Amino acid sequence: MNGSSLRAVGALGLATALALTPASLALAEETPTGTHHDEAGDGDDTGTEEAADLDAQLERVRRATARYQNVRLAEADGYTLGESCITGLGYHFVREVAESQEELAITEPNSMVYVPQEDGSLKLAAVGYVSKREASLFGEEFTPPATLPYYTLHAWVWEENPNGVFEHINPNISCPGRDG
């Protein structure tokens, strides 16, 4: 990303934008199965090639973000806790918002998503991408803005999401003291 053209954003505002999209509000009450590129294709060779390409891209993301398994390293690189845990989303540690598609790179996510563990530690579960304008990565369109003017995309590369790698809400994510 071009640091000079990125605008730092308040962590609380970005975390709210990531959490309160129209899709997340609807999915918080029900969790329909979403569609995404790693579901079964139509059986042609193109689908197989696209799936292999997507798998390779997701592996690049995992390699680029593996160091952030340690939340302290994410903080040292400028990711800041946005707000308390959100059921279905966990904790968002955010950095910058891209101005446009050109400033996005799959190996440089704008946010890290952590889930609480029983021992109180945090485990990296997903990465997030945020843009001020319409954008797409991995062949997926970003979710349009709701509360704040940001387009977002989650990629659950470290924690399985039964609804799909790019679905906004992960029904497996819970927050201590908030779930009931």
Image (spheres, rainbow, N blue to C red):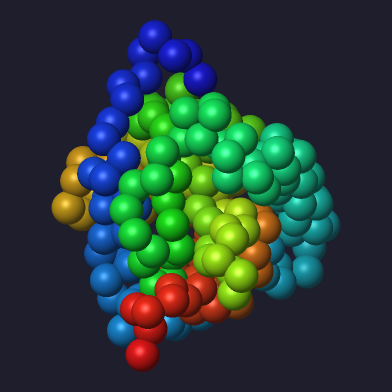
Q: Quadrant of the C terminus?
A: bottom left
Which residue sits at x=80%, y=58%? 48
Question: x and y percent of residue 123 in the render?
Answer: 62, 58
- Which picture quadrant has residue 122? bottom right
Which residue sits at x=46%, y=23%? 103
Count of marks, rendered view: 0
- Which picture quadrant has residue 51? bottom right
Eyeballing the image, is 76 above or below 22? above
Q: Nearer the viewer, residue 16 or 144?
A: 16
The extreme left residue here reads 147
Instruction: Determine if residue 135 is in view.
Output: no
Which residue sits at x=51%, y=20%? 1
Is 135 left or right of 118, judged from the image as shown? left
The extreme bottom residue here reads 180
The extreme front residue here reads 119
Q: Nearer the viewer, residue 18 or 121?
A: 121
Question: x and y percent of residue 93 in the render?
Answer: 44, 45
Question: x and y percent of residue 14 in the render?
Answer: 30, 43
Question: x and y percent of residue 166 in the render?
Answer: 53, 59
Is 45 left or right of 41, judged from the image as shown? right
Instruction: Determine if residue 137 is in view.
Output: yes
Which residue sits at x=76%, y=46%? 59
